[in-house]
Image (cartoon, grey):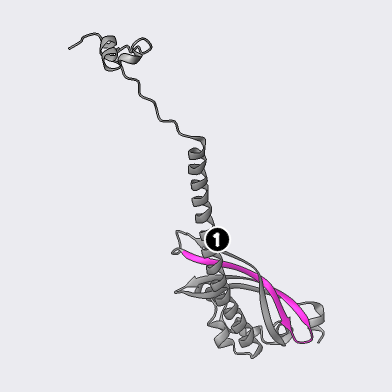
Amino acid sequence: MVDDPKQSIQEQNPENSASVTQIDTGLTQTKKPRISIWTIFGVIAGIVFLCLAIVITNIIISSKKTAVEEAAITSVLDNYMKYMAARDVTNAYALFSPEFKEVYSLSDIEGLTKGDTYELFDGYQSLFIQVSRFSTVVSTEKPIRDVARISGTISYKGNIQGVFESTFEKLDDKWKISRIKITVPPAKLEQ
């Protein structure tokens, strides 16, 4: 057995003995793995893509929910206008929230179907929601509830348009009117 590392290499390869030299220091060097720029770019792109997918999914879900809620509110508003045009105040009053009913009585609503204020409902044809804002309200006085602020246009016979602003509360999965304001042009009152 040879203790000299040079000699052991020369014995193994005698034809290259003059050109091969090896020194055994007992230390081995390991290469640290290098992360390429493409790997970093791929990880960042993956994270951005994942975040973008989450945001887009939330927008789609939110817009579908808004469309469903707007349809339900449109139905309530349409029924309210039809009931009031038919002077069916009992059914119209049933569409209001308990909070509204604490302030206004059935006879207050009935008063809207008499005199000039009836023009707000007479000749009603349809309505269109232009702006809707949904939120959840947290209060110490009431339980957590969903609220919608809705505004839009009302079409009447004679190609006349009015506008409305309203607030709704969702109670027991049904939208109830908390506030409504209808404005018609002077031409509507002159009919």
User: How would you classify the magenta stretch by its main secondary structure?
Assistant: strand
Q: Is residue 144 visible?
A: yes
Q: Please name the residue shown 36% across and 9% down the image.
A: 18
Q: Is residue 100 visible?
A: no
Query: Which residue ends up furthest to the front in the rendered image?
Result: 15
- Closest to the observer: 131 or 63? 63
Q: Amino acid at mark 1?
A: Ile
Q: Please name the residue shown 45% across and 33% down the image.
A: 35
- Closest to the observer: 168 or 97? 168
Secondary structure under the numbered disc 1 in the rendered image:
helix
- Closest to the observer: 17 or 98? 17
Query: Residue 116: x and y, percent?
Result: 74, 84
Task: Indicate whether 43 appears above or below 64.
Answer: above
Relative horizontal placement of residue 35, taking residue 73 as reference (left or right)? left
Task: Indicate whether 140 appears above or below 126.
Answer: above
Query: Residue 21: x and y, percent?
Result: 35, 11
- Closest to the observer: 140 or 153? 153
For the C terminus, the quadrant is bottom right
Query: Residue 136: x and y, percent?
Result: 50, 62
Q: How many marks?
A: 1
Q: Please name the residue shown 29% across and 14% down the image.
A: 9
Q: Is residue 44 magenta?
A: no
For the N terminus, the quadrant is top left
The segment highlighted magenta reads 145-165
Query: Residue 162: x and y, percent?
Result: 74, 77
Q: Crowdedness of circle 1 by 10 Å Cα count: few (<14), some, many (20+)? A: few
Task: Indicate whether 143 appears above or below 87.
Answer: above
Give the quadrant of residue 14: top left
Q: Which residue is mark 1?
A: 59
